[in-house]
Image (cartoon, rainbow, N blue to C red):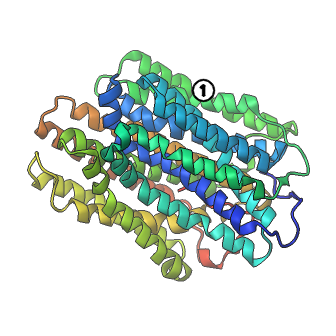
């Protein structure tokens, strides 16, 4: 997204706080839908039928479309005006949510989830430019700073809200309520949207449609067999599809370099990969959020499919993780990061790994038919680690990026975060579902332990990748941040 914008708003915009409220509600609504369906997945599958892998697709279809269209969504705002594109995106999200709630089959629901993710990818990038158009000076930093807590709250509430709404079965809606809840929220945002200031880039950048198509095709070819094929007995087509996907992604890289050489604006700036630090940050983000999203899904699946609990119990099982995340995010931001800088990030990875290992021990020592008594403590430790990692990570990741590349880098980080979540759902979800397919309690317990061991190995790789991001003798707290730097989509 362009760093310079033409502002049609006055220096002190009258409706700025009302407009900010609408933007924050839209952010929370879009990000809630990344996790709210995880708890409802088994109930959806029981109602609509289809292969068990559809449970993964209910989440992955949304995050995959969200990730792959996020940067293009930002470009649309540059071209057509962010206020206009924001309103179109919210309208599209509301209609897609209604379609999801009315879906008569699993296949149609997955298709509507793709549309929902695409609409979210149009909405989210407009938020930062619209805030800059309405606020000036210190108020800009304050307004941008309000996004982080709202994102954290959305992450905390998503799984729990999904369990509560599905279990409540309001007016016989069952799982459909997790989509219907978006309708009044979106309607309220659209009612307030006229108070937003207009924000438009002075120059119209072109859309890299070929680059977007290559990225979507390559990633889809990799993710599809990860979810659909049996991890223990992968058929030849799955390996061929993944190999072809990697070739297409290499072609995407070549296309981006050629676009940069010929003076066109690529989807991803190749110069971001000039040093090891930013590519290491992308790998770290992919691995970390794959573990986080994959484990959240695994806990939910095991609680419902392995232990036979209801959706409310499954949602509340993740509450210690969510509370730990919220608590450690506040402590890290207020006290630890200003003093210790990026070292807090490594403490977060270590704590998350400790929580994963504690969960393995808890499952091992428990009755196969009951939830482990020590699991809440293990998940709380994992949540504390998650918050300690995410608070300093994004500033550390953007440290080596030049000011003119900050927008592109932040958009790519957000996209990779969503993509990592998709891969986590695909890989860890498949590991668990394959091991637990017999339906026996002992097999389900072994499957959840095996999945957590895979997650532990991925966290070791995450720590190794994060070490490559290190910048000696400099602290995150001492690095000035641009007002135009968008926060991450947690």
Residue highlighted by disc 1: 217
* x, y percent for residue 386: 42, 62
Q: Residue 270 is drawn in which quadrant?
A: top right
Position of residue 450 measured from the top left corner of the image (x, y, whole percent): 24, 43
Residue that appears at 36% across and 54% down: 160
User: Residue 26 in the image: x percent, y percent?
Assistant: 61, 53
Badge count: 1
Check disc 1 and report its element: helix, strand or loop: helix
Q: In this view, does 378 lie to the left or right of 419?
A: left
The image quadrant of residue 484 is: bottom right
Q: Give the farthest residue toward the front.
A: 171
Visible residue check, residue 484: yes
- Rendered position, 152 above or below 287: below
- Residue 264, image x, y percentages: 85, 38
Front residue of 30/235: it is: 30
Crowding near the residue tagged with mark 1, few <14, some 14–19, many ≥20 C-alpha atoms within 10 Å: some
User: Which residue is located at x 49 percent, y 33 percent?
Assistant: 100
**Residue 470 left/right relative to 309:** right
The reply to whether residue 454 is visible in this rendering is no
Residue name at image x 68 percent, y 35 percent: 253
């Amino acid at each position: 997204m362009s760093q310079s914008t033409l502002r049609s708003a006055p220096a002190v915009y009258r409706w700025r706080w009302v407009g900010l409220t609408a933007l924050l509600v839209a952010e929370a609504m879009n990000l809630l839908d990344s996790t709210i369906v995880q708890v409802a997945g088994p109930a959806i599958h029981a109602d609509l039928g289809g292969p068990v892998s559809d449970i993964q697709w209910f989440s992955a279809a949304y995050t995959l479309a969200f990730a792959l269209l996020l940067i293009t969504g930002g470009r649309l705002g540059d071209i057509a005006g962010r206020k206009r594109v924001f309103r179109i995106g919210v309208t599209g999200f509301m209609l897609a949510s209604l379609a999801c709630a009315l879906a008569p089959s699993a296949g149609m629901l997955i298709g509507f989830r793709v549309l929902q993710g695409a609409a979210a990818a149009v909405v989210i990038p407009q938020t930062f430019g619209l805030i800059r158009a309405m606020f000036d000076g210190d108020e800009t930093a304050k307004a941008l700073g309000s996004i982080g807590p709202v994102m954290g709250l959305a992450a905390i509430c998503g799984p729990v809200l999904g369990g509560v709404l599905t279990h409540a079965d309001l007016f016989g809606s069952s799982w459909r309520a997790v989509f219907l809840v978006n309708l009044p929220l979106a309607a309220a945002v659209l009612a307030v949207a006229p108070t937003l200031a207009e924000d438009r880039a002075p120059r119209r950048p072109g859309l890299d449609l070929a680059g977007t198509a290559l990225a979507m095709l390559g990633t889809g070819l990799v993710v599809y067999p990860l979810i659909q094929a049996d991890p223990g007995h992968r058929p030849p087509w799955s390996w061929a599809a993944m190999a072809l996907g990697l070739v297409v992604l290499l072609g995407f890289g070549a296309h981006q370099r050629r676009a940069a050489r010929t003076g066109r604006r690529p989807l991803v700036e190749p110069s971001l990969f000039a040093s090891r630090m930013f590519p290491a940050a992308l790998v770290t983000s992919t691995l970390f959020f794959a573990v986080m999203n994959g484990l959240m899904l695994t806990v939910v699946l095991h609680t419902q499919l392995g232990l036979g609990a209801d959706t409310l119990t499954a949602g509340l099982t993740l509450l210690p993780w969510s509370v730990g995340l919220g608590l450690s995010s506040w402590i890290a931001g207020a006290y630890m990061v200003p003093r210790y800088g990026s070292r807090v990030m490594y403490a977060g990875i270590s704590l998350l790994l400790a929580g994963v290992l504690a969960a393995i021990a808890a499952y091992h020592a428990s009755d196969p038919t009951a939830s482990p008594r020590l699991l809440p403590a293990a998940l709380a430790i994992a949540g504390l680690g998650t918050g300690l990692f995410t608070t300093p990570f994004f500033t550390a990741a953007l440290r080596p990026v030049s000011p003119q590349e900050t927008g592109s880098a932040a958009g790519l980080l957000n996209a990779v975060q969503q993509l990592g979540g998709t891969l986590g759902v695909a890989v860890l979800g498949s590991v668990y579902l394959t091991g637990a397919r017999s339906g026996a309690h002992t097999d389900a317990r072994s499957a959840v332990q095996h999945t957590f061991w895979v997650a532990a190995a991925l966290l070791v790789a995450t720590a190794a990748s994060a070490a490559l991001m290190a910048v000696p003798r400099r602290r995150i707290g001492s690095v000035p941040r641009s007002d135009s730097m968008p926060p991450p989509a947690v």
